[in-house]
Image (tube, grey):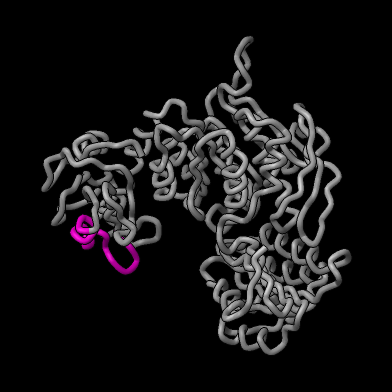
Amino acid sequence: MIAMTLSEIAAVTGGRVSRASGEETVTAVEFDSRAITDGGLFLALPGERADGHDFAAAAVARGAAGVLAGREVDAPAVVVPPVPGRNTGTYLGATDPDGHGAAVLSALGRLARHVVDALPGLAVVGVTGSAGKTSTKDLLAAVLAPLGSTVAPPESFNNELGTPYTALRATPSTRHLVLELSARGPGHIASLCAIAPPRIGVVLNVGSAHLGEFGSPAAIAQAKGELVEALPPGATLPGVTSGAGGVAVLNADDPAVAAMASRTVARVVTFGRAAGADVRAEDVVLDAGRARFRLVTAHGEARVALRLVGGHQVSNALAAAAVALELGADVDGVAASLSAAEPASRWRMEVTDRADGVTVVNDAYNANPEAMRAALGALQSMTGEGAGHRRSWAVLGPMAEIGEGSAGVHAEIAALAGQLGADRLVALGCPDYGERAEHVADVAEALTLLRAEIEPGDVVLVKASRSAGLERVAAGLLENDGLVSR
C-alpha cells in the first residue's frame, strides 16, 4: 500500500478522524487484529461470532496506526458514514444490524480505488469463471513474476472484502495486480471492477456454480460478462503497441465465453484447444495426471510440462499464458514459468503421498458440477492405464448453491465416477449420490471406513463444497505419517 495518513484516508473515504491527530501513517490494511503489524489499518468488521469494533484497542496495542470503523471506538480511528439504504441486514453472510460492516466495506473500496488510481504503471488483471479462478490466478502470479513485482490474492479473496484488500497490497513498485472476481448475483463483478478497474479481463468458463442464486446459465454468463464490459477500449490505432488498451482474454472452447466478444470494446484474445484459438494447446498428453503439451501462439511455440494435477489445468495455463504474452513475456519464458509452477493455494488438487504409498488428493476447498467432473477426470488420469492401474477412491460431499435439480446433478456425478472407473465412491452427508455410493454420516465415520480399507498404492480424492469441511478427511488421512507433497 502507498503510505497515507489517517487524515488522507478520512478525506478519501468520506470519514472523520477520531481520537487521533490525523498524522498517523498507515502502510497496510488488515481485518484480523491478530495479524496487525506496525503501521497497519485495522478494519473493524462485524463477524459471525464477534464484532471487529470490539477489538479496536487490541489492534492498536499490537501496532495498528488506526482503525477504519463504522462507529466510535476506543482507539485512533477513521469513522466512516453509513451506506444509504444499508443500515440493517447482513453483509458477506455476517449479521450487520447497524450497517457498520457495509459502511466499512464501502469505505475500503473507495480507499482501494484511490490507491489503484495513484499507481498509473499498474496493470490490473481480472479473472472470473465458474471454475478454475484460483488455480489460474496462481498461474498468473507465476508467469508474471519474472516480468516485475506481482500482487495476487491469498487463497480465494474474491469478493467485496477480498478485492480491495488485495488491491491495497500494491505499492509503487508493483507492476501487476491480479484479482480473482466472483459473483453471487448480477452487478457483483461490475462493482468489483469499479474498485480496481482491470485492463485485462480473463473469462475462463460459464458453468453451474451458484446456479441456485442466478437461476439459469444465461444469467451466469451475463454476470461473468460484466468483466469484459468493464474493460477500456483496445489498441487498434496505428502506432499503438499491442500492450496498450484493454484486452479481453476469452476461452474459445466455451461458446458462452466466446460469445462475450460482442460485449466488449477491448481487443479480444482467445485461448483453448480449438484450432482457431490465438493461444492454444496441441499434442496434449496426461502423464500420471499431469499434462504435457505444445504451447502454440502467434509469437512462436514451446513445450510445457505442468506440475499441477488434472487435464483441466491446461485451459487455466493457456489463459495465464495469453495474459503474460500481452504484458511482454516471450513464449519460452512463459513455458518455463508454467512448467515450474507448483500448487499455491491450499486444498485445490493438493497431492500428498503417504509413506505407505497411499496418495491423498485434497481438492476440498469448493465444488460445483464442472469442478467435480474435472477432479474425477484427474483421478482417472492418476489411476488408469499409464498410471499403474491404482485403485481409486472418490470421497465426495454435497455441492451447494446449484438450485433446482440438485438431486439429479449429484446422481449424474455419481454415475460419472463409475464411468471414469472410480473403484469406491464414498458419499459424506449427501444421499443424492445414490445407491452406488457408500454413505457415511460425518467426517469421523468416513475416516473409520477409509482407515480400515485403503491399501498401499490407493489414490483417495476428497472433494465437496467448502461448507462440508471435507478437508478434515484429508487431514485425518495424513496425520502422523511420513509425507511427500508433490
Whole-percent x, y for residue 228 in the image: 57, 34
Q: Residue at image x 73%, y 48%?
A: 314
Q: Is residue 378 above or below residue 78?
A: below
Residue 482: quarter of image: bottom right
Which x, y percent locates residue 42? 27, 52
At a point 33% along the width and 63% down the height, the residue shown is 47
- Compared across the picture, whether 40 is left or right of 274 comes to left
Residue 440 image-quadrant placement: bottom right
Check if residue 60 falls in the magenta segment. yes
Please, which residue is most extreme toward the right here?
Answer: 385
Asked if residue 428 shows in the view, the reply is yes
What segment is highlighted magenta in the picture?
46-61
- Residue 264: x percent and y percent? 59, 28
Identify which residue is drawn at 50% across, 37% down.
149
Observer-nearest residue: 202 or 289? 289
Who is closer to the viewer here, 215 or 283? Answer: 283
Residue 320 forms part of the magenta stretch: no
Looking at the picture, how far across and down is residue 1, in whole percent? 36, 39
Residue 207, above or below 226? below
Number of on-image labels: 0
Tell me if 284 is positioned left or right of 181 in this view.
right
Residue 403 seen in the figure:
no
**At 60% across and 77% down in the image, what residue appears?**
478
Residue nearer the viewer, 484 or 135: 484
Q: Quick one: which residue is furthest to the top in this view?
A: 238
Name the chief secondary structure element in magenta. Answer: helix
270 relative position to 293: left or right: left
Q: Quadrant of the C terminus?
A: bottom right
On screen, residue 455 versus residue 96, left or right, reads right
